[in-house]
Image (tube, grey):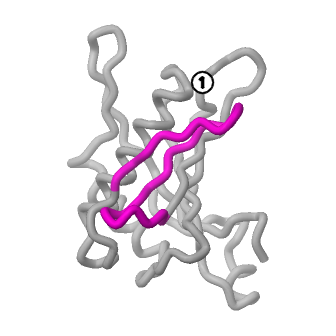
């Protein structure tokens, strides 16, 4: 479902800011954390590349990054410009899996020509024919991820 993050609704507009992230939902929880992080990053890169003309970024690629204990997937343009960072929410404890949600945080200097709420609507139209797919134990699994535009809590 493409919609605006309820928690940020209004506050970003009142502060004169704009959305700068997506909340990603419906992420499979049984896939090892590093693997699903990379897969979600690649899925987001494929989506953003599908709308490269509208976004003005060109092709976007995903690059898995492990920095200490933190794992993420950087989304970069063909010119190697960082546009976003995909981070998933871990289950915690001894379970090395995703909790089922994550974030796509756009770089502060990323030029976003279109409101992210509109981009989330594009994703809602694109997703049914471009399902998130992974293979586990020889079986292909298909999911339709959900995006919601919002504003990172660590920014005004």
Residue 108 screen position, x and y as percent: 61, 73
Image point (46%, 51%), residue name: 146
**Numbered disc total:** 1
Q: Which residue is mark 1?
A: 97
Predominant SS along the magenta part: strand
Residue 146 in magenta? no
- Give whichever of 141, 87 is nearer the camera: 87
Q: Position of residue 44 (x, y in %)?
A: 39, 52
Can you say whether 35 is above or below 86 in the image? above
Please tell me which residue is depicted at 51% across the width and 66% down the height of the picture.
3
Q: Is residue 75 magenta?
A: yes
Rendering coords of residue 104 (x, y %): 54, 56
Q: Tell me residue 36's x, y (percent).
A: 47, 31
Q: Residue at x 27, y 10 (%)?
A: 138
Q: Which class describes the residues within 10 Å of circle 1: few (<14), some (14-19), or many (20+)?
A: many
For the residue pair 74 and 138, the one nearer the viewer reads as: 74
The residue nearer to you, when weighing 138 against 79, is 79
Q: Quadrant location of the C terminus?
A: bottom right
| Dot 1: element | strand
Is residue 79 rendered to the left or right of residue 148?
left
Which image quarter holds the N terminus?
bottom left
Q: As drawn, which residue projects farthest toward the left? A: 129
In magenta, the rendered stretch is 61-83
Determine which quarter of the picture holds residue 63: top left
Looking at the picture, does residue 59 appear above or below residue 28?
Answer: below
Residue at x 76% of width, y 71% of height: 155
């Amino acid at each position: 479902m493409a919609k605006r993050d309820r928690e940020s609704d209004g506050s970003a507009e009142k502060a004169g800011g704009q959305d700068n992230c997506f909340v990603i939902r419906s992420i499979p929880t049984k896939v090892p954390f590093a693997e699903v992080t990379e897969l979600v990053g690649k899925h987001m890169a494929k989506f953003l590349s599908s709308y490269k003309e509208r976004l003005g970024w060109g092709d976007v690629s995903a690059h898995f990054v492990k920095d200490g204990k933190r794992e993420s997937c950087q989304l970069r343009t063909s010119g190697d410009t960082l546009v976003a960072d995909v981070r998933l929410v871990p289950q915690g404890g001894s379970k090395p899996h995703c909790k089922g949600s994550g974030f796509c945080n756009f770089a502060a200097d990323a030029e976003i020509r279109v409101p992210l709420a509109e981009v989330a609507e594009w994703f809602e139209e694109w997703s049914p024919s471009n399902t998130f797919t992974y293979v586990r134990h020889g079986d292909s699994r298909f999911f339709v991820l959900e995006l919601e535009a919002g504003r990172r809590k660590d920014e005004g």
